[in-house]
Amino acid sequence: MHRVGAAAFFDLDRTLLRGASGPLINEALVAAGIAPERQLPFQGALYSFYEAVGETLPSIALARGAAFLARGWSAEAVREAGRAAADKLEKLVTPFARPLLAEHRSAGRPTVLATTTPYDLVLPLAERLGFDDVVATRYAEDGGQYTGKLVGEFVWALGKLSAVRRWAAGRDVDLSQSFAYSDSLYDVPLLAAVGHPHAVNPDPRLRAVATVRRWPVLFLDVPPGVPKLFGLEPYDLVRVVTRPELMPYARFDMAGVDLVPEQGPAIVVSNHRSYFDVAALGLAAARRGRPLRFLGKKEVFDAPVVGALARAMGGIRVERGSGSDEPLREAARALEGGQLVAVLPQGTIPRGRDFFDPVLRGRTGAARLAAMTGAPVVPVGLWGTELVWPRSARVPRIGNLLHPPTVRVRVGRPVALGLVDAVADTDAIMAAIIDLLPAEARQVVQPSAEEVARAMPPGAPLDAVAPA
């Protein structure tokens, strides 16, 4: 038979979920009066070890023996426990799992949950997540009770590959064109059998295999392209060295930070006065314990070292003038994953005399992104960042320790938008930002030649700063 279709197979624990499903499933079984409250010896320790390093032979032996221990249980009662467990398991689904599943569906690929976890216990969660099918360990039953035996193979390692192959053979699915996602070394047989294997949150052993075989490594709790090591992403490390007390060359006056959502998606918008704006906005988000993903000019991403760091921090590259909507689509995916996305509607720092114009002019990207996603738009007014890092300087003034300037950060309530007219919504966004700036920001001033020069990029011609 010639198979032309492709499917996407997903493991469950530590892949789609942030950790193991076992503790919550066991809790549901106990609550339903099915499983005994007393745990098996070392069961808790095995779960904790699994959370840290992934599957081990002892944890799999425990799972394999569960079928025998379930002998005599009511199958319907177990299925009811599975429905109860799904309520809590759904909260453990990683933020970027749903967008990834949606991408496969939009491409016409069936999505299949392929897991060792018993079918009756995991089916309710699979239905909530919109999976097309489930390949899982099945317990044999007789007269509505489990017999202590399995129907077919134990769906693990080579057994999982066998079950997936049988599923594919019956549905004209070609594994060589298919996708698979797993965290475990023991899923290498399945990963190696598909054309598009992905190591997701891999255990150390799978990470080594993926490196040798050049398989993509993903983490579905962070935006695509953001790496993690020992559970930490680059943002976690940068946050340690960008604390206010470690920046003695600036002081920070922040207010309204609690208006940044503690969880869920939001578009953070601000005026643009300095390259130091990124640090100020990042600090405000960090006070809420959240990373901030920036849309930035392509020049930032093309720069050595800085560009690699920007990408690793989940930054989104924007190439102005290209007409491409891909940056907005990427930002929309980040928002769908519950992230904070920062957009500076002015696009670039105003130059020369334009820097002193009290009227802020914005591009429509933030408004269009809000219309695409329905995410709230949180305005931020920045003032004083240019005193830390003037436009004319190639680096911030980190030596100014005796008289550090004050950076003023004000966060406002979400902007009320119509989500129909991007130009009108952009005007509303810019007006909300202006309202958060100090009174002096709304005054018309005549800057001196020296002030204009500081608002020009390094190396700007002298005639660019001549009096008007």
Image: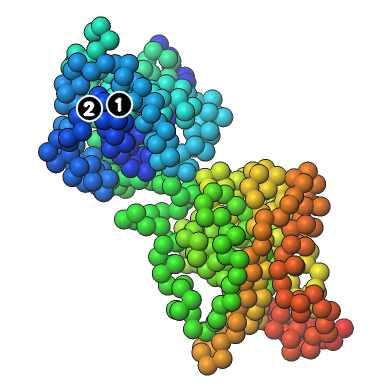
The 10 Å Cα crowd at callout 1, few under 14, some 14 to 19, many 20 or more, is some
- Residue 354 is left or right of residue 22, and the answer is right
- Residue 147 is left or right of residue 105, and the answer is left
Amino acid tagged 2: Ala
Q: Which of the 4 image quadrants contains residue 141?
A: top left
Q: Count how many numbered circles sit on residues in the image.
A: 2
459 in relation to 23, above or below: below
Q: Which of the 4 image quadrants contains residue 274?
A: bottom right
Residue at 24%, 12% in the rendered image: 145
Q: 249 or 257, which is in the foreground?
A: 257
- Residue 425 is left or right of residue 79, and the answer is right
Residue at 37%, 43% in the rendered image: 18
Check contact, mark 1 vs mark 2: CB within 8 A.
Answer: yes
Q: Report the residue that reaches farthest toward the bottom.
A: 402
Q: 40 or 331, which is in the foreground?
A: 40
Percent coordinates x, y for residue 354 in the rendering: 79, 74
Percent coordinates x, y for residue 55 in the rendering: 23, 39
Residue at 65%, 71% in the rendered image: 382
Q: Report the residue that reaches farthest toward the top.
A: 143
Amino acid tagged 1: Ala
The 10 Å Cα crowd at callout 2, few under 14, some 14 to 19, many 20 or more, is some
24 in relation to 119, above or below: below
Disc number at residue 405? none
Q: Secondary structure at mark 2?
A: loop
Q: 29 or 155, which is in the foreground?
A: 29
305 in relation to 84, above or below: below
Per the model, the C-alpha gap separating discs 1 and 2 is: 8 Å
Percent coordinates x, y for residue 427 in the rendering: 79, 58
Q: Report the residue that reaches farthest toward the right.
A: 468
User: Which residue in the protein does label 1 denote?
Assistant: 32
Residue at 53%, 63% in the rendered image: 285
User: Which residue in the protein does label 2 denote?
Assistant: 35
